[in-house]
């Protein structure tokens, strides 16, 4: 029995060291699992986006050629030959159609490329975090394996049956499973919060650009001319790009955390018509487009309200999950301690055969 006590004394410091490693890295298994889901989602979205960009580039090329062909072949003819209200309306309708199709294709291409830049950055950061979790997970697995080997050596040879130890081990396994489930849910919630925080920044920029567009539109109504038109279109284009990013981010958060995120309705920002500004610019067309800008601005503000509301809700959920995580983490620590205490008691009772010395 003295030999067993001596062995237990030698084993105690290593036992405490390994238990400390396990406690510090308990989070890693669930965190790694959730992070791998997140990385895979980003990789899949990037693959699809690269294909979409190729399609958008080809579409933009075709629409641009058609728009320029119509513009170049008809402006002079319109200026010198067409006359009357019907002729002007017909030309305006056709020119706006060609221009609208071209700029819609161009915005799709730009939006997709902006989204790709954001995803590239997000993927790089996600992979870095995954690698860190993988390192801690490997450390946890290694420590658990080493601890299991120690216990196997201590319990080597004929030993009595220890049903209470089996019961405590089962309780520890259950506590570990509960902890992993809550940890993974917490990580998904946290990732959704992080994504929505980026969406908040983007939608805030979109509202700023819409303010700029509305100011430029007011300037245009009071004789701002070409400079006002240019400022107006530039602000609207930037607002459209940011709004497109928001839609992509919300969709990403929905895939990461479907239980806590709701999609936002689609929306479109009016861009006006360059050719109409050139050929039909007057107070009435300026006022009509100003109304369209105000309508688009209202939709953007509604989206901002949605994003802010969901972000607040996600943070509230995260606080609840953190409290739950702390509780199951304490439960896991208690289950581990009870199991280790029981094993320590058993060690002192086992004297039928001395296990081989442990080599650190």
Image (cartoon, rainbow, N blue to C red):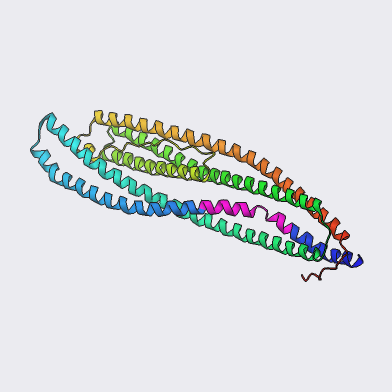
Residue lying at 29% horizontally and 36% vertically, measured from the top left = 224
Residue 18 in the image: above or below residue 88:
below
Q: In terms of depth relative to the viewer, which is nearer, 76 or 123?
A: 123
Q: Which residues are magenta?
A: 20-38
Q: In terms of depth relative to the viewer, which is nearer, 170 or 137?
A: 170
Left or right relative to 222: residue 46: right
Residue 130 in the image: above or below residue 358:
above
Q: In terms of depth relative to the viewer, which is nearer, 150 or 330?
A: 150
Left or right relative to 255: residue 71: left
Residue 54: give x, y in percent of width and height: 32, 54
Q: Quadrant of residue 4?
A: bottom right
Residue lying at 50% horizontally and 57% vertically, measured from the top left = 124
Is residue 117 something one can see in this rendering? no
Residue 315: give x, y in percent of width and height: 58, 39
Q: In terms of depth relative to the viewer, which is nearer, 233 or 12?
A: 12
* Magenta span contains residue 343: no
Is residue 158 something one can see in this rendering? yes
Q: Quadrant of residue 186?
A: top right
Give the total number of marks visible in the rendering: 0
Left or right relative to 112: residue 352: right
Left or right relative to 294: residue 183: right
């Amino acid at each position: 029995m003295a030999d067993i006590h001596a062995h237990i004394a030698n084993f105690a410091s290593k036992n405490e060291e390994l238990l400390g490693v396990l406690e510090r890295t308990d989070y890693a298994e669930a965190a790694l699992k959730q992070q791998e889901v997140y990385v895979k989602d980003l990789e899949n979205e990037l693959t699809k986006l690269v294909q979409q960009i190729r399609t958008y580039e080809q579409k933009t090329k075709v629409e641009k050629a058609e728009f320029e062909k119509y513009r170049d072949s008809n402006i002079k003819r319109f200026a010198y030959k067409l006359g009357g209200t019907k002729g002007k309306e017909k030309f305006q309708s056709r020119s706006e159609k060609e221009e609208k199709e071209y700029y819609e294709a161009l915005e799709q291409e730009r939006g997709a490329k902006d989204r790709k830049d954001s995803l590239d950055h997000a993927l790089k950061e996600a992979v870095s975090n995954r690698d860190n979790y993988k390192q801690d997970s490997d450390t946890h697995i290694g420590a658990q394996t080493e601890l299991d080997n120690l216990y196997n050596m201590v319990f080597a040879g004929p030993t009595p049956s220890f049903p209470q130890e089996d019961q405590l081990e089962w309780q520890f396994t259950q506590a570990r499973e509960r902890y992993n489930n809550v940890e993974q849910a917490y990580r998904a919630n946290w990732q959704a919060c992080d994504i929505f925080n980026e969406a908040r920044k983007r939608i805030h920029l979109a509202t700023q650009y819409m303010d700029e567009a509305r100011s430029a539109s007011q300037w245009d109504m009071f004789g701002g001319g070409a400079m006002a038109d240019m400022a107006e279109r530039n602000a609207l284009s930037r607002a459209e790009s940011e709004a497109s990013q928001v839609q992509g981010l919300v969709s990403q958060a929905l895939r990461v955390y479907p239980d806590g995120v709701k999609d936002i309705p689609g929306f479109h920002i009016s861009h006006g018509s360059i050719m109409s500004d050139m050929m039909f610019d007057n107070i009435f067309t300026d006022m009509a487009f100003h109304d369209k800008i105000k309508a688009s601005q209202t939709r953007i503000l509604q989206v901002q309200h949605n994003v802010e509301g969901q972000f607040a809700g996600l943070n509230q959920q995260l606080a609840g999950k953190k409290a739950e995580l702390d509780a199951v983490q304490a439960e896991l620590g208690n289950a581990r301690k009870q199991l280790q205490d029981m094993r320590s008691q058993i060690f002192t009772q086992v004297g039928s055969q001395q296990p081989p010395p442990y080599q650190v």
